[in-house]
Amino acid sequence: MERMRPLAFRVTLCALLAGGMLFVGGCREHMPHALTLGTGDVIETHAKPIEGGYYSNWDPYAATITLEPLEDVNPVNTQHVFVATVLDKEGKPLPNRRVEWMIAEGGVGMIVEVDESGWRASRGYKKTNTFAVSHTNNFKHVLTRGNDDPSDDVHLGVGQTWCVITSPTQGTTHVVAYAPGIYDWSKHKAFAKKHWFDVAWEFPQAATNPIGTPHVFETRVFQHSDGRPLPGYEVTYRITSGPAATLNPGGKQAATVQTDAEGIARVTLEQATPTEGVNELEVAIFRPEDKSADQPSVRIARGTTSKTWIGPRIGLTKAAPAAVRVGDPFDYALAVTNPSQVDATNVKLVDTLPEGIQFVSADPQAQVRGQTLSWDLGTLAAGTTSPARVTAKATRSGTFQNRADVTADHGLSDRATADTRATQPALSISRTGPAEVLLCDPIQYTVVVTNTGDAPANNVRIIDTLPEGLVYQGQHRTVTSQVESLAPGQSMKVVYEVAAEKPGSFDGVVDATADGGFKASANGTTVVRRPALALTTEGPKIRYAGSEATYAIRLVNNGDGEARDTVLVHALPTNARLVRADNGGKAEDGKLTWALGNVPPGGERTCTVVLQTTEIGELVTASSVTAACSKAADRFVTAVKGIPAILLECVDSPDPIQVGDATTYTIEVTNQGSAVGTGIVIRCDLPKEQQFVSAEGPTKHTAEGQSIAFAPLTSLAPQAVATYKVVAKAIEKGDVRFKVALTSDQMTSPAEETESTYQYAE
């Protein structure tokens, strides 16, 4: 009754009611069957739930159990640990699962202890030497053997549990691990074998040797119970990895030897070629076959060992200042080291100086061939260093990588480099200015000098030596400027103007200098051009007052430079009136102005102006043209003359007339011209049907028959009128013609006029 009392308290967090019975199932992390509450003495529990749940899959998560190792060999009187793992269907370990441990009858061995970890009263326990119970762990654990050697510790994970067995006698132990929560009978058991022999062994220790030297491996086999050597056991050595090597006897990758009277089996490992590396070896011990006792050959143990081949090491370091000045000496410090435990032989050091670095000296003395320095260092003892120092100087600026190489026997080599930056100033200069100018333009130059080096440039001076034909400030032929220092990358800018004394092409050179002989030059060409404007006027030489005169003003650029902003001005004369002007000429303040823009070399422009003469005399036209760097003027004279223009008019009154009546012919002579008419003579002819009656005029007249002549009129001013009258009487009827003729000193032929008169009779 005492043992059954705690069963009343068996519950889990996953308790389910099924069929009116209390059973447990369906929880992955918790014990699926029962949890005995409380602590204290261990209480044995049932493997499966009570009636009803027993026939069901009450732990649906548990799927399989594994056991390791499945088969192994141990010396008698030693202990061996088995580890069981309960897994779900996905192969994940399950905690809190019961595992029962059993040793089959008929074999040897017994259970020493099992996993009793946990705080429940239902935790693991050993019932007999052949049966025990444990539960898989909730957490990770480490099972030590109570010694200071961590290599034989057993590391347990979640879902694992353990059992320890031993045997004092030789034979085989058959172990069964049973997980009652697994529903599938084909998967709820795991089986393992443990073979016990009164044999102990010592595998060869891992060793380290210089490359190229043979090494002997020894495996010792003896009786575990009393330590007596066991001769005749077979030990097989096999090289599994590493550099090429062989085992002797046999000269192959594997060799089998028997233990001698001392229980020792020896083989010799030899390298095919001296090479660093690690040879891994597998060692297997076999108990020989004993036909008399009907005992077959059995592998007792298997282990591993290794051989590490070490060679000499060679190392090289090289140091140099990070920055130096060109031309200043500096040192390269070299150190050849052998950090290994083996001497390095035939050590050679070679230092190759880069171009731009000049050798000065070396300590110790080196063999020098061009840019290559070499030292024969011979044997360099293990753990020692051989220093060297090279003094050199840079011949130009830049970053120089100096490389040194060291070699030794067995293909040893190393390389070291050191970077040194050699600095110096460097000048660059540029001069910018106009490629072309006009003679009257100032020439502006911009000079920029830059320190393109990587060290300061001191006392930087700019000198521009002007070519003949250019002048600075009206008298100087050189332009100079100076600055105390230019830092790397810094620039100095100078702007100045020069003037051209004549046209032409001028090649100039500007120099920059600095302390230390550093200099730079720049050149450039400026072409100086000059426009040459010429102005001509074409017009009439003679015009009569009141007439129009047309003037063509022609502008030509005979120079080699463009005439910029050309303006033509024509002064309007006071004795003429502007009629019109072409090409957009604008009249203002007594002058005509044309804005003609730029006139290229060889270009021409023509502007036309039309004037009306108003006075007799000289008509003077004056024109001028201005442009950048050029101007011109021209004048033209037209003689304005006057001319008399005599108008002859004759009218009769009355008309018609009756025969016997008289009519008066009024003759008007008008000077419509611009000059005085002289020697004006009027002559009249009466028709035969008329008879002269009388005449009057500015001069006396004479009448002879049918002709009447007036004495010459000395002069008739412009626009003046002279009037003559002749009275005649009709003597016959008819349509008659009265004729008047006028001559003057200026006329080459007479002007004639007729007037008709109708005469009638009653």
Image (cartoon, rainbow, N blue to C red):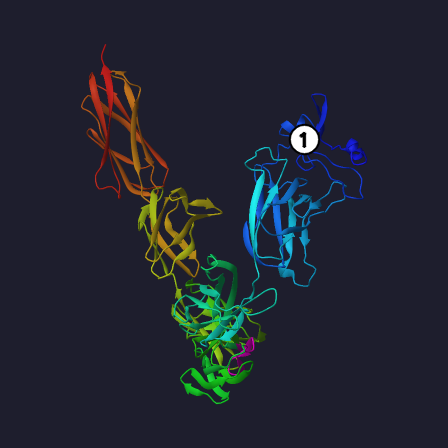
Task: Evaluate whether residue 197 shows in this view.
Answer: yes
Query: Relative to 63, is 257 on the left or the right?
Result: left
- Please tell me whether residue 325 belongs to the stretch shown in magenta: yes
User: Which of the 4 image quadrants contains residue 93?
Assistant: top right
Question: Up-down: is 577 above or below 647?
Answer: below
Q: Nearer the viewer, residue 589 or 413?
A: 413
Amino acid marked by disc 1 = Gly
The number of callouts visible is: 1
What kind of secondary structure does the magenta stretch mostly adopt? strand
Q: Nearer the viewer, residue 665 or 66?
A: 66
Question: Up-down: is 670 above or below 522?
Answer: above
Q: In this view, which residue lies farthest toward the bottom?
A: 365
- Give the x, y percent position of residue 363: 51, 88
User: Which of the 4 image quadrants contains residue 201?
Assistant: bottom right
Q: Which residue is mark 1?
A: 25
Q: In this view, which residue lies farthest toward the top?
A: 762
Query: Relative to 89, is 126 on the left or the right?
Result: right
**The residue tagged with tag 1: helix, strand or loop?**
loop
Q: Nearer the viewer, residue 608 or 251?
A: 251
Q: Residues within 10 Å of mark 1 (few under 14, many from 20)?
A: many
Q: Nearer the viewer, residue 587 or 50?
A: 50
- Give the x, y percent position of residue 535: 36, 56
Report the quarter where the N terminus lies: top right
Residue in view at x 72 percent, y 24 percent: 21
Residue in view at x 47 percent, y 56 percent: 294
Q: In this view, which residue lies farthest toward the front?
A: 292
Task: Evaluate whether residue 433 shows in this view.
Answer: no
User: Which of the 4 image quadrants contains residue 408?
Assistant: bottom left
- Give the x, y percent position of residue 191: 56, 45
- Give the x, y percent position of residue 221: 54, 67
Where are the magenta residues, as a range? 317-339
